[in-house]
Amino acid sequence: MSPSSATSVLAKHRHGAFPKQAKYCAELQLVHGDLCGPITPPTPSGRRFFLLLVDDTTRFMWVAPSDQV
């Protein structure tokens, strides 16, 4: 097998589907976080960073401005 065909086979590889139901069922049992920034242009108050938290069960989101991070 040539290197180019091996690359082609790997590029066509498919991953399994994501599970339809989460393993976590209680609120706030699994929370994802993402620190975002620096953003341009800054907000009107001059902030360039914010923290985003997402509850995996309810999909409720919290946004904390940079001075609270």
Image (cartoon, rainbow, N blue to C red):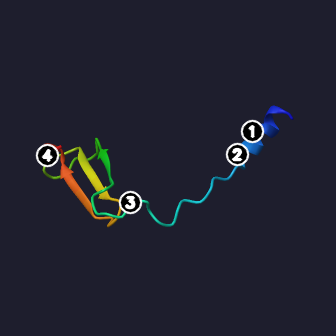
Residue at the disc numbered 4: 68
Residue 38: percent from the left, percent from the top?
A: 28, 41
Q: Indicate which disc, 4 or 3, sits on the residue closer to the N terminus.
A: 3
Which residue in the protein does label 3 denote?
Answer: 24
* Residue at (18% x, 43% y) in the render: 69
Discs 4/3, front: 3
In the rendered structure, the answer to whether residue 5 lies left or right of residue 27 reads: right
- Mark 2 and mark 4: Cα distance apart in space: 43 Å
The reply to whether the C-beta atoms of the residues labelled 2 and 3 are less than 8 Å apart is no
Dot 2 corresponds to which residue? 11
Q: Identify residue for label 1.
A: 7
Tell me, yes or no, whether the two marked residues, 2 and 1, touch with CB atoms within 8 Å: yes
Sequence-first disc among 1 and 4: 1
Q: Toward which corner of the image does residue 49 lie, by quadrant? A: top left
Q: Residue 43: give x, y in percent of width and height.
A: 19, 51
Q: Amino acid at mark 3?
A: Tyr
- Image quadrant holding the N terminus, namely top right
